[in-house]
Structure formats: C-alpha cells, structure tokens
Image (tube, rainbow, N blue to C red):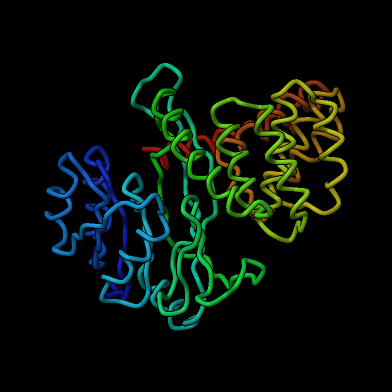
Amino acid sequence: MTALPISVCMIAKNEEKYIGQCLQSISRFGLEIVVADTGSTDRTKEIAKQYTDKVFDFEWCSDFSKARNFCADKASNNRILAIDCDEKIQALDTKRLAEQIKQFPHFVGKITIKNLRKNDNESEAPADYSTDEIVRLYPKNEYEFVFPVHEQLRKIGASDDKEPLSCFDVPIELVHYGYALSKEEMYAKQQRNLALLYHMAEDEPKNAYVQFQIGQSQAIIGNHTEAVGAYEKALSLDADVTKPYVQLLLVSLARTYRNAGYPEKALSFMEQYAPLCKTAKFTELHAELLWGSGQRLKSMALYLKATLLPDADTLGEGLLRCYAHLIQGYYDTGDTKMAEMFKIKFAECKESQEKGLS
C-alpha cells in the first residue's frame, strides 16, 4: 500500500455511536488522524485516543468552519482530507490518489458520498441511499473552510465564492450514516442547522448559498412552504446554472413544488431549465414529473437518458427507479423484449447497490 502524505481531520462532539467504525476505516490506510473535540461528554475522546494521539480540545463557538480550520492547523501534512465522525471509508485506491496528488498539487479533491437513509420501521438496516459530491481533500496552505454551517472550501484570501475550484475526483468510497436517523433526531439536527443558517442570513442577506441550505433543512423536515420561499430567494440571488449547487437548487425547488401539491408548476419549472441542465438528478426528476402527468413516452426517453449520463451513479436509489419505470413502460407498450432487458439491468443494479449497503 502506497503511503500517503495526507492527514484526515475530523471534528467531534458526543459521537461515540459512530466514531469507532469511522476511525477503524481510516486506520486501515495508515493515514494520520487528527480529531478536534468540541465538548464531548460521552466516550468520544476515549475512543479517538485509541487510534491517534492527536486529539485536541476546541471551544465550541457555533462555527463548524473555525473548528475544521483549527483541526487542519494541528495536522502534520499539508494535504487534508476532511471526514465526519458519522462517515467511514469503504475503499480507497492509495496508489492512484498518490499519483493524483503529484499531478494536481494545487487542486482540491471531490468525493462522492453515499448517504444512507433510515427505514420507516426504525430498523437498523438502511432503507436506501442518495449521493452527494462534495469537495473534501485540499492543501491547507491554499484553502480554508468558510461559513459557520454547511461549510465550504475557499481559496485563502478570496473575497467571495465566485472563483470556481479546480477539482479532481478522489478514488474513494465514503459512506455517510448521518441521515440514517429517527424523525426526532433528524428534526433536532435540522433545527440546530436552521438556527445557524438564519443567523448567517441576517449577516449576509444576499448570500444565495445560505438561502439554498435553509431550503434544504426546511424541506427535510417537511416545511414545504418555508422551503419554497428559501429556494426561490436563493434562485433570485444566483441563477448561474454552471454552479453545481445551483443545479441541485433547481432540482430541490421543483421537487418541493411537487411535494407541496403543485405538480404542474414543478413540471413547468423543469421544462424551463431543461435546456440548461444535463445532470442525472435533474433528468430523473424531469422524467418523474412527466410520468406523473401522463406523458409516458417523453418520460421513458428521459429515464433512459438519466441511466446513460456520466453521473448516473449519483442517482443512488434513483437509478433503480429509472429502470423500474422503463420496465413498466415497455410492458405497457407491448415491447416485452425491452422490458426483459431492463429487468436484467434492474437486478444487476440492485445487487450492486445491496453490496454497497452491506
């Protein structure tokens, strides 16, 4: 295994449920581990010290970015991999990553994270998952985290987030358990986030990203009206669809229109932005709304397109939904051969995803 000049940095508070499996997954790769504890009252620090002697106390100041930057300052290496306690590394190609670090010394690394979601029956097994692409690997002498919550990397000294980050895809499989919570736990988590986000919005009323994250938290806890208001405000402040978060904003707003009981408005909104948005998540939701409106042939064309796009793997459970609708659609049109072909693809995809959840 290739030794990597990387320090894994994580902030923690009362994370005894997950931190052990997280640190064990990191230790397999011989990476330096640095933990900044923000006031744990459980066994978090005790468990962390079993894996690293770099466990530091950070006085919590309602700012995740300050905690992350403090943690990075304590690392021996310049290249930092930020991981949360409720995540774990399933696989990491150390040889390839070592080559990428040499090839892209001033780039940041983008990671696809698999977010597990809890079953409605409260069983411990995850129900399904979604995926996010997040920048987590960076040289600390060039980048730092900003924003008190939903923190983002920015070049040191940059005045705003207008400058795009130069990224490469990190060869790592990361699983996130932070969405596999009970309804009560998720509500409490989002209320904590909203308190920080609304404070940020007071200080930065024209920050579109903050409004987007307010919408995300409100949507998660089912406050559709509040979510729509925040999403619409975000879009009025920043409609640059070349930004990944704006494309996700469009998908989130359309889905919330639908969830709030306005499917026609959601579909009209998607049709408006369809020429500009080519992501698999946008395409899959567009197909779903067309299917619900009775436009089956158009819907099937988009479901098929979503499965073929370069970022189709970011659909998570949505990829199975695409195949399921194609199976039903082809059966309904009498094309049994195509339906059977997609049944095979569905089975292969389901088997692959179940292995990923194990």
Q: Quadrant of residue 137?
A: bottom left
Which quadrant is home to the C terminus? top left
Please report the residue visible at 39 percent of the width from the left and 49 percent of the height from the top: 62
Residue 185: percent from left, percent from top: 39, 28
Q: Residue at x 40, y 39 (%)?
A: 178
Q: Is 20 on the left-hand or right-hand side of 224?
A: left
- Residue 244's spot in the image, x, y percent? 66, 56
- Between 238 and 341, the one lying in front of the other is 238
Q: Residue at x 50, y 65 (%)?
A: 153
Quadrant of the image for the N terminus? bottom left
Q: Residue furthest front?
A: 202
Q: Residue furthest top?
A: 121
Left or right of 180 on screen, residue 331: right
Asked if 141 appears above or below 196 in the picture, the reply is below
Task: Using residue 83 as the reference point, say whether residue 114 is left or right of it.
Answer: right
Figure quadrant of residue 198: top right
At which x and y percent is residue 28?
23, 59
* Number of marks in picture: 0
In the rendered image of this protein, does residue 54 appear above or below residue 300?
Answer: below
Residue at the spot 23% in from the left edge and 47% down from the top edge: 39
Who is closer to the viewer here, 57 or 135?
57
Residue 138, how many percent across, how many down? 44, 71
**90 or 69, which is in the foreground?**
69
Above or below, 310 against 224 in this view is below
